[in-house]
Amino acid sequence: MSTPGRARKQSHVLAIAPFRRLWTAMSVGGLGDWLALIALTALAGTLTQGDGYPTQSLVIGGVFLAKLLPAVLLGPLAGLLVSKVDWRLAMAAADAVRFVVVLLALVIGGHQWLILAMFLIECASLVWSAGRDAAVSGLVPADRRADADRVGLLAWYAMAPLAAFLFALVAGLVNVLAAIIPGFGPGTGKVMIVVAGICYLATAALVFTLDLRNAGGAPKPSVLTQLADGWRLAAANRAVKRLYVGMIGVFAAVSIVVAVGRAYVGVLGGGDAGYATVFCAVFVGAAVGSFFGLRWLTELSRRRFFGLSIILAGLTVAAMGLIHNLVLVAVLTFVSGVFAGIAWIIGFTVIEAESEGRRPVDFLHAAARVVFLGVVAVSALVGGFFGEHELTVNGLAYAFDGANLVLLVGAVVAVVIGVLSLRRLDDRPEVPLRVDLLAALRGERFAPEPQEEAPGMFIAFEGGEGSGKTTQSRLLAIWLRDQGFDVVQTREPGSTKVGMRLRAILLDSTHQGLSAHAETLLYAADRAEHVEKVIRPALERGSMVVCDRYVDSSLAYQGAGRVLGADEVAQVNQWATGGLVPHLTVLVDVPPSVGLRRHAHPADRIESEPLDFHERVRSEFRALAARDPERYFVVDGTLSQPEVSRLIQDRVREVLPDPVPRETEANTGTMPAIRD
Ligand SMILES: Nc1ncnc2c1ncn2[C@@H]1O[C@H](COP(=O)(O)OP(=O)(O)O)[C@@H](O)[C@H]1O
Ligand SMILES: Cc1cn([C@H]2C[C@H](O)[C@@H](COP(=O)(O)OP(=O)(O)O)O2)c(=O)[nH]c1=O
């Protein structure tokens, strides 16, 4: 539904000039951050070159940890600090600190200092980010802040491959110079640290010249709060939870490549340039994957493609751990990035559809940070303690170090998560994956052998309490009979002999406390009986079946209302009905507050549920309809009865075989109907 205010096309959030300047500062600062990270980890690798593999692995891990810990531990503090001081000063001071600290890294040697420097830079960055949030709330109107956050994050992530690319470029140049000029001085790490310092200075200048005094607003929730909030939102929807697990799993596997990259590249004979190339390859791969993820293999179910990409990303990471060749490792890194990108964009799109347009950006960004932290810590420790090993197979020596082990373990985890995602999120269980995939590779959608389709037509009515389904399904049955069709009008629960008994159990309000699982199974039992004894025989005779409630009621009431999750309830019902799906489902949509007031009789067991139960039911019905607009017709049940009927008739006419045209309908006359 669109409101007039929404319908007005808004200009891009970057059209707000002061925000554009802030955004530029965010991008330049982001470039500095990424450069500092790559440079400090590369320097850590170079400094510890002679100290043995375990030390090197632990020191590089230490730098990564120093980058990630402050946000998790000190995030809320920084927000509090900036809410008390002038944000512009705070940001400029943070930039000055970052500038001084990176440059000190040039002067002070020793790997302990690199770790401390990273920690200090990150603490300053926290203050900077809190200042940025305050600035954004001063510069951007409230309804545009989500857009502002999005372009900010986009810029930040886009700076990663750019920084890595610059780093690789300079590393190449330094190598050439070192070859030409014997004893050529500074290594790439040091050169890039200077560039990072310049970025911080530029950021300070950009921020300082921003003219705005009324910035303020509440600081953003901390990483841990964002995580908890995001997870709580997902709790009601199992598919969303599984998508989160898949996305985070594939992210973890690919993070390992970055975490062990410096040490592994060193073992393979590469240096700074090789490390930066691998770093760049992950991000470029992910960008390519997320750009094409929705466009490749369009005939394959997206959920299946999601699981498959996670498995393939895992297999690529495994190959990386086993193949000792720098060029191949760089190529495989790119490929694993592509698969991770595909999984992320699909996960994102499906989650957005499942959660009514809410974008889980904050949650995923926070989760990515925490997961990266964990991955880096574990990789550094395992890699460091496992150390270097050499296996001898048939007289051939094969190096198997901590990095190899960590890559393989990550790969196995990703493959397991991928297989689980594939099984648990499958939306085409009736079609074998291999057949589906082969057809999709040929650009076709595999259609199972059409089952002998019964000649009749099945129309279901769905909606909340008092929406008017019963009234409308009766009126539609009468109208269809007038059109000359043989009509079977029926309802759930309770249209068979056994069904009547089940209905009594289900709706009698003395049966309070019936377990949600038992309730689901009883509705499914009623439905199984109904399909076998009433609906299928009618369809086989060629009748029109008009049914008041069907499977979607269970998805909405038991799946969402009772929070059992739509997937399991759908599986039970798929089994109970033998997969019988209506040709058309009419959803009569009314707010529960309106529908519940319409009934005069005393409330039954389900009607007496609280309002938020009925709200969940309604939003699940709407979500189901939104997912398959071809098969659903949503009608506003608050309109008058004749109006609702007319809209339904217009829609049903479209699917009728050989309908009487609307213009001549008045002349065909109406059979006298007995109405109650
Ligand atoms: N479009 C409508 N506007 C106002 N009242 C309606 C409308 N449609 C049905 N009603 C009334 O609302 C009550 C519930 O209708 P019913 O068809 O039994 O709904 P449901 O089967 O969805 O519970 C009935 O009293 C009916 O007369
Ligand atoms: C068919 C079905 C109904 N229900 C609930 C919804 C209704 O409250 C009740 C059916 O009662 P009914 O008297 O048929 O109500 P309505 O006129 O609203 O259709 O059973 C489920 O919870 N799950 C289901 O699968």
Image: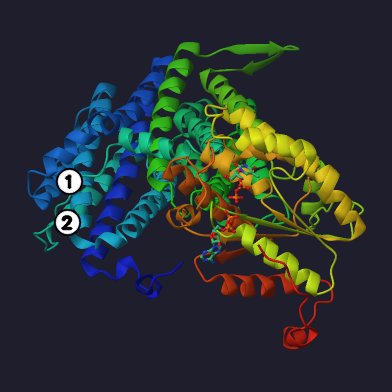
Q: Residue 95 carries which label?
A: 1
Q: Which of 213 and 617 is in front in this view?
A: 617
- Specify whether 615 is left or right of 203: right
Label 2 to label 1: alpha-carbon separation: 9 Å
Tell me: residue 592, above or below residue 642.
above
Quadrant of res 477: bottom right
Q: How crowded is mark 2: few (under 14 residues within 10 Å), some or many (20 or more)?
A: many
Q: Quadrant of ligand 2?
A: top right
On the question of residue 538 being in view, the answer is: yes
Comes first in the chain, label 2 or label 1 = 1
Tell which of 347 and 636 is nearer to you. Answer: 636
Image position, residue 92 (x, y; %)? 13, 49
Does the rendering let one see residue 270? no
Whether ligand 2 has any atom under 8 Å from the Cβ at mark 2 is answered as no
Q: Is mark 1 within 8 Å of ligand 2?
A: no
Amino acid found under the numbered disc labelled 2: Val
What residue lies at 47% left-to-right and 28% top-to-bottom?
A: 260
* Quadrant holding the C terminus: bottom right
- In this view of the protein, which residue sits in the foreground, 84 or 573? 573
Residue matched to label 2: 207
Q: Which residue is drawn at 17% across and 58% down?
A: 138
